[in-house]
Image (tube, grey):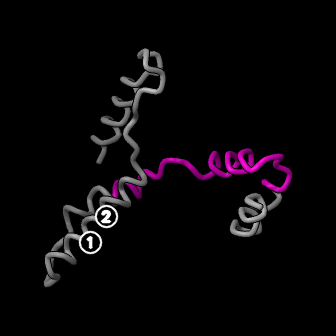
Amino acid sequence: MICSWIVNVIDPKLHASVAYADTTKSMWENLRKRYATDNTPKVHQLKTAPASCKQEGLEVVEFYSKLMDLWSELDNYTKIPYCTCGKCECKIGERISKMVDEGKAH
């Protein structure tokens, strides 16, 4: 049932690439690998948007909601790395360092 739902909601051009997946998991992984790429320009836009956001006559609640929307969308694009092994063998330091370096570009 889930495989059928995925096939029905994706672009028809992608049907051939997922049609022969044995399981829902393999179908989802195929799509995730294809589309779960970093979107650096979008992240940069989302990081600069709050700085240029102005209240301009909005009520405080509306303005705060606008900022929260920007921050929530940014959270969807940026994930804080965490230790996955519990033994410092997963190179968490390298992943955090990479995240900090990427942040410097913004």
Q: Mark 2 points at which residue?
A: 70
- SS of the residue under disc 2: helix
Three-letter code for the amino acid on which mark 2 is drawn: Leu
- Looking at numbered disc 1 in the image, what kind of residue is underneath it? Lys
The percent position of residue 89, horizontal first and vertical second, equals 46, 16
Q: What stretch is highlighted in magenta?
A: 17-45
Where residue 25 appears, as percent x and y from the top left, is 71, 46
Tell me: residue 87, above or below residue 67: above
Left or right position of 100 against 92: left
Query: Residue drawn at (32%, 35%), measured in percent from left and top?
Result: 101
Label 2 near label 1: C-beta < 8 Å? yes
Residue 104 vs residue 41: left or right? left
For the residues labelled 1 and 2, the Cα–Cα distance comes to 7 Å
43 is within the stretch colored magenta: yes
The residue furthest right is: 20
Circle 1 packing at 10 Å, graded few (<14), some (14-19), many (20+), is some
Determine the secondary structure under disc 1.
Answer: helix
Asked whether residue 14 is drawn in magenta, I would say no
Q: Residue at x 30, y 42 (%)?
A: 103
In the image, residue 6 lies at what x, y percent? 71, 62
Number of the label disc, if any, that sits on residue 66: 1
The main secondary structure of the magenta stretch is helix
